[in-house]
Amino acid sequence: MRILGTKVVPALSGNMTLKDATNEAMRHWINHPTDTHYIIGSVVGPHPYPDMVARFQSVISAEIKKQLQQEIGNPYPDYVLACIGGGSNAAGAFYNFLSDEHVNLVGVEAAGLGIDSGESAATTALGKPGVLHGSKTLLMQTADGQVVEPYSISAGLDYPGIGPLHAHLFETGRVQFLSATDDEAMNAGIELSRLEGIIPAIESAHAIAALSKLDLDPDDVVVINLSGRGDKDLETYIRWGKY
Ligand SMILES: Cc1ncc(COP(=O)(O)O)c(C=O)c1O
């Protein structure tokens, strides 16, 4: 980010995770409303940010349709899979397929050490309606409405809510939500690295891990939204695999 000219300010409050960085970004925004234009890189936060981010990211599904038309003569895959932290890459991958009901859309959350372990970020499995960062959405919370600290080996999925668009898609059933544990995601990430020479971001590796949980036919066309930015995660891969 610094190479691109960004001034990076670390979030030192709370547990210094994605949620705390989002808190800090919103504090900055509230204090600098006249010259702050864009605050969050996911489909979370108050309106219109979730909608804006989803629309920007929708180029992903426009591109998927275009490339499938070129490659297989049909813009519709059988499945589109994407990981979900706040849900921006998934929102982009799903956006132009939302009305195409025959395309199965699958969002994959981080189950961390296991959904029932107390150390996870599987919001649709564990969350209840609540308000976080200006959106009413599904939220991991205590009976008193206090935010439960999420956990995932992947920093980008370590978020206690999901964007309101995804809460809606979960409620209506348009998107199927699965989860993958740390170990499942790391194994999938290593497997992709060995098979394809692409080191996936650990976030995306969760989507790859969910492949084995689907009842697929050999002829199914499956698109996985993948970030090859595993270079940012090399330390975690090395520590986890003891390489
Ligand atoms: C490579 C990558 N993928 C996915 C995510 C998760 O974000 P979102 O759920 O908004 O796509 C992140 C977040 O930092 C990320 O860095």
Image: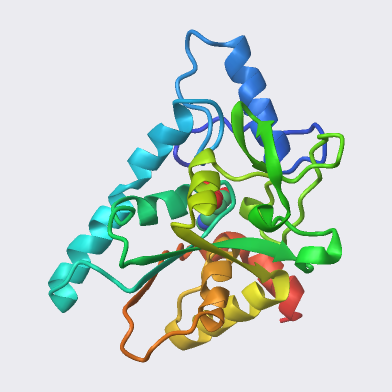
Question: Relative to the observer, which residue lies in front, 187 or 95?
Answer: 95
Closer to the camera, 207 or 124?
A: 124
Image coloring type? rainbow
Residue at 20% across, 67% down: 75
Q: Position of residue 59 (x, y in %)?
A: 29, 49
204, above or below 98, in the image: below
State the residue at coordinates (48%, 25%).
47
Relative image position of residue 64 (x, y in whole percent):
27, 62
The x and y percentages for residue 114 are: 77, 69
Which residue is pictured at 46% across the width and 66% down the height? Answer: 228
Q: Is residue 213 rendered to the left or right of residue 142?
A: left
| Residue 10 appears anywhere in the view | no
Q: Quadrant for residue 48, please give it.
A: top left
Rendered-image quadrant of the C terminus: bottom right
The image shows residue 80, relative to residue 127, as above or below, that is below
Q: Which residue is depicted at the point 38% across and 89% down?
A: 217
Is 94 displayed left or right of 131 in the figure? left
